[in-house]
Image: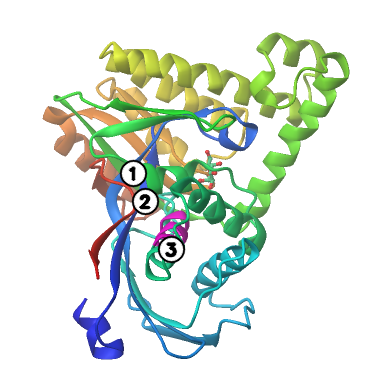
């Protein structure tokens, strides 16, 4: 990064830390269920070197904003982005790792707030870089857990572990089937030569998304409390069945809808893994539509614009699968589509979106890429 050299001299490390997609398994991670994410080739880049003093000098190039502070004063910053750095340092200190002062430059091509986990990419990148530069020898799994704890404790989002795991552990052309209870994982090749994954960015960002997200989590755990009274072996929704939910939770409640969705979604992830193995993208795509139905009508985290795009996909009869992706309340819709009709279909979706919402629909073709890594290290 020439920019880094201008400001801070020679970098000791340059890290690339990717965003993620999630093929299926939404809102299952914090319920200790299954997810199927993959890292993508859109990423944040961090260049870093150590300082002689205890100061922290960071520059967010895309925002043209500087942060200057001291490592013994980790005070939240209203601009948002420095908090991921501060929270990550706090996690390192909590675990007994002492950093010194350092300089850093941050930039990226990963859209922020589009549901592609730019925050997990950033936090994983920061921890990965600090681990190398200060030679802490922290394991990858521990870095993933620290990245998640940064979100939970400093940022205040009670997220699960999926985004951080995918960002750190991604592999080119492979998706990860992760068991969020045991943290066992398998890689699966995602290989449908005639198909492509695309992301359509609704351009919608809901300001109350974090509050609504945390509330969903509480509703799920309230459901577990009810089920546990009759089935004490149920420690999370991962252990529950559709029958238990139907038998115990009153059907006219939000808690019922949330729990039913999560239990069914866990089943869909396992089916999807079998479908991937069998190269059956038709049924895989049907499950994506089913997930969207659940997210929209049972979990209630979709938005009108995402529903509109998924309806367009379904009604066209040509698209294999589509669904909103990530936490919800805006962000991207993931579409599995035949390469031969892709350009034409995207064009018509863009026209219809513009007509209906007066919004430009951005699209990205997804390439499944490697997890967090150093591009340069000395
Ligand atoms: C966000 C969270 C993840 C996960 C998804 C929903 O991306 O950070 O932990 O819960 O939402 O699947």
Label 1 secondary element? strand
First in residue order: circle 1 vs circle 3: 1
Coordinates of residue 6 in the picture (x, y in percent): 23, 89
Which residue has dot 1 on it?
Answer: 39
Label 2 secondary element? strand
Does residue 323 appear left or right of residue 147 in this picture? left
Label 3 secondary element? helix
Image quadrant in which you'd find residue 2: bottom left
First in residue order: circle 3 vs circle 2: 2
Indicate which disc residue 19 carries: 2
The reply to whether discs 3 and 2 touch (Cβ–Cβ < 8 Å) is: no
Q: Is residue 189 above or below residue 154?
A: above
Q: CA distance from mark 1 to mark 3?
A: 21 Å
Q: CA distance from mark 3 to mark 2?
A: 20 Å
| Quadrant holding the C terminus | bottom left
Residue range of the region highlighted in magenta in the rendering:
119-128
Q: Residue at x 42, y 53 (%)?
A: 114
Membership of 110 in magenta stretch: no
- Local packing at callout 1 (Cα closer than 10 Å; few below 14, some 14-19, many 20+) is many
- Image mark count: 3
Judged by depth in the image, the label closer to the viewer, 3 or 2, is: 3
Indicate which disc residue 131 carries: 3
- Local packing at callout 2 (Cα closer than 10 Å; few below 14, some 14-19, many 20+) is many
């Amino acid at each position: 990064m020439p920019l880094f050299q201008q400001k801070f001299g020679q970098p000791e490390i340059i890290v690339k830390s990717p965003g993620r997609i999630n093929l299926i398994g939404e809102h299952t991670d914090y319920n200790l269920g299954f997810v199927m994410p993959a890292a993508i080739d859109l990423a944040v880049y961090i260049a870093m070197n150590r300082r002689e003093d205890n100061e922290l000098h960071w520059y967010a190039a895309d925002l043209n904003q500087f942060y200057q502070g001291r490592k013994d004063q980790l005070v939240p910053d209203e601009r948002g982005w420095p908090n991921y750095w501060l929270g990550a340092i706090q996690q390192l200190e909590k675990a007994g790792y002492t950093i010194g002062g350092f300089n850093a430059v941050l930039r990226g091509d990963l859209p922020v707030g589009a549901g592609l986990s730019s925050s997990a990419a950033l936090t994983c990148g920061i921890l990965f870089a600090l681990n190398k530069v200060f030679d802490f020898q922290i394991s990858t799994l521990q870095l993933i857990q620290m990245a998640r704890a940064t979100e939970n404790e400093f940022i205040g989002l009670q997220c699960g572990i999926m985004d951080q795991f995918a960002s750190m552990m991604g592999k080119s052309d492979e998706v990860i089937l992760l068991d969020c209870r045991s943290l066992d994982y398998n890689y699966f090749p995602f290989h449908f030569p005639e198909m492509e994954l695309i992301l359509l960015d609704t351009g919608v960002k809901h300001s109350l998304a974090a509050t609504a997200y945390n509330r969903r989590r509480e509703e799920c755990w309230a459901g577990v409390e009810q089920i546990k009274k009759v089935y004490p072996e149920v420690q999370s929704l991962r252990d529950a069945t559709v029958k238990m939910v139907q038998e115990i939770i009153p059907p006219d409640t939000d808690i019922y809808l949330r729990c039913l969705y999560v239990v069914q979604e866990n089943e869909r992830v396992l089916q999807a893994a079998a479908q991937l193995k069998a190269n059956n993208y038709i049924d895989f795509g049907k499950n994506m539509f089913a997930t969207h139905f659940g997210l929209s009508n049972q979990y209630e985290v979709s938005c009108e614009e995402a529903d509109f795009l998924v309806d367009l996909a379904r009604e066209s009869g040509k698209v294999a699968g589509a669904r909103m992706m990530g936490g919800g309340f805006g962000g991207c819709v993931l579409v599995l589509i035949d390469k031969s009709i892709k350009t034409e279909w995207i064009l018509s979706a863009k026209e219809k979106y513009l007509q209906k919402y007066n919004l430009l629909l951005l699209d990205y073709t997804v390439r499944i890429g490697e997890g967090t890594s150093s591009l340069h290290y000395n």
